[in-house]
Structures are given as structure tokens and as C-alpha cells.
Amino acid sequence: MNDKTIILGIGINTLPLNDLLINIEKIIQDQRRVVIAYANAHALNLAWKNARFANFLNTAEIVFCDGFGVRLAAQLLGRTVPARFTPPDWIGQLADLCVRQGHRMYFLGAQPGVAEKAADHLRKTYPGLDICGVQHGYFNTTDEGLDDDEVITEINRLAPQVLVVGLGMPAQEFWIEDHWSELKVNIALPVGAMFDYISGETPRAPRWMTDHGLEWLGRLIIEPRRLWKRYMIGNPHFILMVMRELISKKKNTKRGLEC
């Protein structure tokens, strides 16, 4: 496993996507159980104010970089996070791996019907892909809905190797943490709004934006009411935290030189 670099108190793996996929396959082959998390500016903002979420990230075996902001912060702080990749961009490669190796996937999350549409799209794109079960993310919000125990029983009955959870951050991480001891899966992978994008329910920003650090702006334009606080307040807060750490680092370096 690649080393982790610390950004604002959170350890982030310095691994490229190909190495992540290799690690996923090895974890399944070895019949291990691993939580894979992701870190972007929003995640580090949440970790700054929520100790439980920070602990989740720092106890996950793999935390990959999901945002250009994290890469920029690493560069400013003199650290290295060489690659950034977000679940909607690499779910196809994970699906291809599952087809080739005969692994099953289970999709949990999003509004009713959305994860099913995402699953149908991937099944058509990757013939032979076994998405053995799908459950929307509103299962425990009504009296008629399923409860957590019933969902977990169904997941374990279908026995997927990869559980993909899209409940939004930090709900998805806390759901995994709360039920990890009960789940019989090899990989738990939170993916945020990925089901909405793969299903076509929510459009993504143009490729030129997602490839050049402007996906946040594209998302803000597409969903201003839902995301304005995350980006208009969260991004300046993230920059401020990075600047504070950079100033602290320089002060500590200066003290070290004076000693």
C-alpha cells in the first residue's frame, strides 16, 4: 500500500488510479475487508469540524484524492498527491475489473429509481457486469420502508464483493461505519452523487471544467440552491485553513533554523 501524505490532518494515499484498482483486486483475492474513502475540499472541511468524520477518514485503509483543491493544497504545503480521480470518472474501470474477475457489485443510495438507472446503464456498457442488487437511499425514511437490518440482510444474502454507497457525505461514511461489522463485503466504497451522474439524472460539468479544477463551479451552476454553501462558503474556508497551515509550517521552519 502506498504511503499517505497528511493534508490538514487527514492522511491521503499518494497512489494513481491503476494502483487503486490493483489494490482492490488484491483485497478481494485475499478475502480481506477494506473501507475505501475519498478526500476533497468538502471532505476536509467536514473533517475540520467533525471529529467523528475525521476519524473515519484516518482509519480507512485507503483514502484517494477526489479534488483538485486537495492536490493544490498539497503542492502549497510541499507535499505530494500526484493523482486526482473521482468515482464517476473511474466507475467504468471498476466495472470492467468486476466483469473480468467475476466480482459482484451492490448499489445503495440516491433517490428511488436513480441507482437502478445507473446500474442499467453500466450493465449495458459493460456486458456481463453483475450488479446483484440495488437499493435507493430513502429506505428508512417512511414507516413502509425497509430498516437498516433488512437492507444489510439483503446485501449479505446477495454477497457482493463491492458495496457502492451513495448517500452523500458524511451520511454514507457514517452508515458504513455504523454497519461495517455486520456487512459481509470485501470493499465498501462511498461515491457521493455518482449515481445521479451515471443515471443521467443530474448533468455533469463539461469535460474541460472537470479536467481543469473547475468541476466545483460547474456543479454550483447546475445545482446552486443545494450547493451554494458548500462552495461559496466552504471553498474560502478551505483556502483559509491551508494558508494557516502554510504560515504555521513556515514559522516552525524558521524556528528550526534559528535553533
Image: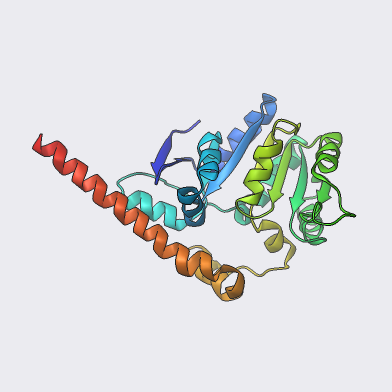
**Front-most of 145 and 103?**
145
Q: How many marks?
A: 0
The location of residue 90, given as percent across then percent down, is 62, 51
Quarter that holds the C terminus: top left
Q: On the picture, is 50 further left or further right than 147?
A: left
Tell me which corner region of the image, top left, top right, bottom left or bottom right, holds residue 68: bottom left
Viewer-closest of 189 and 80: 189
Where 36 falls versus 72 (above or below)? above
Query: Which of the two residues, 99 or 53, is positioned nearer the viewer here?
Result: 53
Residue sitting at the far left: 258
Left or right position of 82 against 184: left
User: As drawn, which residue projects farthest toward the right?
Assistant: 144
Q: Position of residue 183 (x, y in %)?
A: 75, 34
Q: Quadrant of residue 236?
A: bottom left
Picture layout, residue 44 above or below residue 162: below
User: Which residue is situated farthest in the top direction here?
Assistant: 30
The residue depicted at 44 percent of the width and 63 percent of the height is 235
Residue 162, image x, y percentages: 72, 39
> Tell me, what colour scheme is on the image?
rainbow
The residue shown at (78%, 58%) is 121
Q: Position of residue 166 (x, y in %)?
A: 69, 52
Q: Looking at the picture, does residue 257 appear above or below residue 215? A: above
Q: Is residue 144 visible?
A: yes
- Tell me if 244 is positioned left or right of 115 in this view: left
Could you tell me if residue 13 is visible in this image?
no
